[in-house]
Amino acid sequence: TGLMGQSAWAQAYPEKPITMIVPFAAGGPTDTVARIFAQSMTGFLKQQVIVENVGGAGGTLGAARVARSEANGYTIFLHHIGQSTAPALYRKLSYNAADDFTPIGLVADVPMTLVARKDFPAKDLKELVSYVQANKDKITYANAGVGSASHLCGMLLMSAIKADLTTVPYKGTGPAMNDLLGGQVDFMCDQTTNTTGQIKAGKIKAYAVTTKAPVASLPNLPTASAAGLPGFEIAVWHALYGPKNLPKPVADKLQAALQHAVKDPMVKQKLADLGTEPVAPARATPAALDQFLRAEIVKWTRIIKAAGVYAD
Ligand code: MLT
């Protein structure tokens, strides 16, 4: 279609359902955030926003799928902090984490929790740390692959306690949680969007939250900083993207849908029950995300290179 043709379809966007790629397995924390936002954006756009889970390689397989998708707005991408750690962890990425995407905006910052199977012998964080140090070859740490938030938290934990963990990778911490509940894996660091329900049901043991401040919906949990790991802080930011070169009318429409979602009372309520909240509207913008993502890539590249951690 000619320029007019192209702008005609872009002006009319969306005219059919939109696929939101989530780069982790269904039932995990990223999937949970995605489905809440997809529901709100569906209402605004009057077209179904359908989540498709493309797991593997710590989220980089899903990112690669989006990077090579058609720039028509019918494939969008919800990913977290892993978008900024992958460039340092994967030396042969098939995409550029900043240049091969159109930033739509930031979505939510999610706290993490240090959790273990119900009958894990440590009674508090200090005991967990010493038990891990004393049994590091025997106990197992679950994560969602190199580049996931659970992997990143594990990397920070390993350098904080000076002990290498035996890690078990999953396509997401949804499946990892199933094994934690079944006692097939010992412990993990996972987001409150996935652990809150199991903690409140008493089905897993929780030791701390990894945020600077306590999490209101998990009042009995100390911060890791206060409970024995001074300065141990990590929160998982999430953001929304399209592939690069998204036509402006399409990007603007997606931006408007995201602005609607971060103000949506349904989104606020569901996220509050899961220990988090949508970002302020001023951060749910292309410029805010582009600037933040590029700064995060610089930050984590330095930290990861210093830790000497690689995936490939
Ligand atoms: C992660 O650790 O990054 C999470 O597993 C992502 C997810 O499963 O949603």
Image (spheres, rainbow, N blue to C red):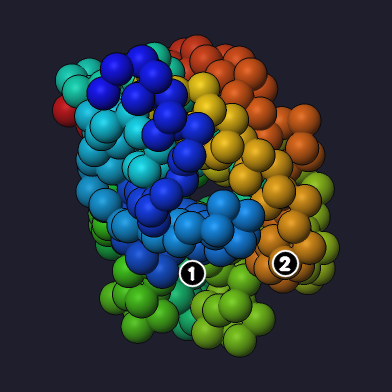
Residue 250 in the image: state x and y as whole percent.
49, 32
Residue at x-position 46% and y-position 46%: 14
Q: Disc 1 on helix, strand or loop?
A: strand
Q: Disc 2 on helix, strand or loop?
A: helix
Say which quadrant the N terminus sits in: top left
Tell me, for residue 116, which label it has, or none. Answer: 1
Dot 2 amino acid type: Met
Q: In this view, does 132 lie above or below 250?
A: below
Residue at x-position 58% and y-position 37%: 253
Where residue 309 sits, quadrant-wise, is: top left
Residue at x-position 25% and y-position 34%: 69
In the displayed structure, does residue 180 sit left or right of residue 194?
A: left
Tell me, for residue 266, which label it has, or none. Answer: 2
Where residue 100 sits, quadrant-wise, is: top left
Q: Is residue 270 above or below residue 100?
A: below
Of residue 185 and residue 312, the one placed in the foreground of this image is 312
